[in-house]
Image: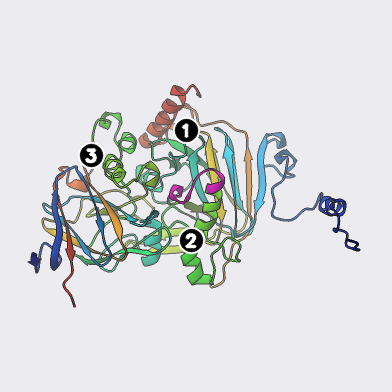
Amino acid sequence: MATDSATASAYGARDHARAQEGTKVDTMPVLPASSWPTPPEAVAAEDLVWAETVAGGNYTHKVLGRGHELRLTDLTGDACAHLLLYSADRPWERLNTADTVKVLWNAYLGEGHLLLSDQGRVLASITEDTSGRHDALTGTSTLAHNTARYGDGTPQSDSPAGRELFKLAALKNGLAARDIPPSLSFFQGVRIAGDGSTEFTGSAGAGTSVTLRAEQDVTVLVANVAHPLDPRPTYTCGPLEVLAYRARPTAPADALWNANPESSRAFHNTADHLTARGIA
Amino acid sequence: MTTTTGSPYAPGRVIHDETVPARAAWSAVVPKGRLLTITDLQGKQAADFLLYDAHDTSVRYSAPDTIQAQANIFLTTGSVLMSNEHTSLMTVVEDTCKRHDTIGGACSKESNTLRYGHHTWSQHACVENFLAEGSKHGLGKRDLVSNINWYMNVPVEKDGTLGIVDGLSAPGLKVVLRAETDVIALLSNCPQINNPCNGFAPTALQMTITEPDEG
């Protein structure tokens, strides 16, 4: 069939596709990660293992090795990084937000807080936090919630719900809807008043970051979506920078290991598990 | 047919009435429209509680969605127990205690080692109850999520410090829940003895399902 279209033939379609080579957009993964132009201070470019900017209303996921650190940065002050963690090869062990706040005796996440699994072990620790506006209690958004709030909550819409994106990320890791427990979120704060009521405190502004250290091999799911309590009438979510790099897991001599009795026992439980498996 | 009017049960025809001994588990399917009354027989007894849509158990109680919906972490009359798809599972239609917890989750043998020490390892815990009782309905480890703690008191201080403190419950206080859809209700009568959630001495709970009277 004769035509003037450049993509009328397989050769033309191939040329057309390949002409996209080198295109850069603001929100995309950068490969290899070591080519990321601005590594965190004191991190060598060759130690980067993950470099990506996640668009507002989008998601990402990765399996991170033990000892790697994950730095999330809210570039514009409008990101909200909803997070789930699973033990990489035993995903029925996963983030337990209730234990995370109860065991550590604090509802508010911050530097030094451990993200605990349901098995009394540490999945990741928060090693740095310049935001202080986080939420471990009110979870993420749902299709029903976003449809009521914004008219739509499907993944392809302009107002995707966090749970819908978590489902996709979970499915790509062999998990399903039943594997999505309550999540936590960074960069849009919630506080609890004396009468138990929730107060949305929002963002600490552009450029704040949170660094997590993987204390065992973990599957990380991140949904960057508007916080469910965000009162703004229009769905607002900014880009999220995601960088991970080689570092080392928390060791017995580190202050974090011995920060308090509960943390210390959580690190001991984690080490006990890894030692038995011949990993550490 | 037995019709009761007044305490300790919700009015109506009693479908099921069972005393759950201290430390034990319980479950039942509660059809839409029926009432489930949880009575704290001797007071200060935490009742760990989970809900699943009986027709699709991937839809289950969600603490975050429940907190979102009512903008408060405490449950009482009028609270709607929401699912992870932000749908209504049950509604609290009566509550004579007025302080129940959404954020503390269940005790487990594993978390007990963190909270109190490894000497607690041989003690029974709510997650053991949830696993054993849930398996009767085809539920497993992957299906356990943050639960409700009826009669448990978990305040959050200004700096975020939270803790399980002395409960406000007393003998005979009750919570009445109306099923908004067919649900599987899973209960662990909390066996914890290392904090005040059970007054350091677990006791029995009464679980009663009633069919409300017409009109």
Q: Amino acid at mark 2?
A: Ser
How far across and down, in percent of the image, does residue A96 sit?
Answer: 41, 45
How far across and down, in percent of the image, does residue B89 sit?
Answer: 33, 62
Task: Answer yes or no: are tags 1 and 3 on the same subunit.
Answer: no
Within-10-Å neighbours for mark 1: few <14, some 14–19, many 20+: few
Tag 2–tag 3 contact (CB < 8 Å): no
Task: Answer yes or no: are tags 1 and 2 on the same subunit.
Answer: yes
Label 3 resides on the chain identified as B
Label 2, label 3: how far apart the Cα atoms are: 35 Å
Tag 1–tag 2 contact (CB < 8 Å): no
Q: Earlier in the sequence, mark 1 or mark 2?
A: 2
Residue closest to the eye, A218 or B120: A218
Magenta part of the chain: A171-181
Q: Residue at x 86, y 55 (%)?
A: A9
Residue beneath disc 3? B194
Can the viewer see residue A221 in this picture? yes
Does residue B100 sit above or below A248 in this rendering?
below
Residue beneath disc 1? A255
Observer-side mark, 1 or 3, equals 3
Label 1 resides on the chain identified as A
Q: Amino acid at mark 3?
A: Asn
In the drawing, does residue B62 fall left or right of residue B198?
A: right
Residue beneath disc 2? A141
Mark carried by residue A168:
none
Task: Give the structural element (helix, strand or loop) at label 1.
Answer: loop
Task: Give the structural element (helix, strand or loop) at label 3.
Answer: loop
Question: Residue A175 colored magenta?
Answer: yes
Q: Amino acid at mark 1?
A: Ala
Does residue A267 sit above or below A172 in this rendering?
above
Within-10-Å neighbours for mark 2: few <14, some 14–19, many 20+: many
In the drawing, does residue A55 fall left or right of residue A257?
A: right
Question: Residue A71 colored magenta?
Answer: no
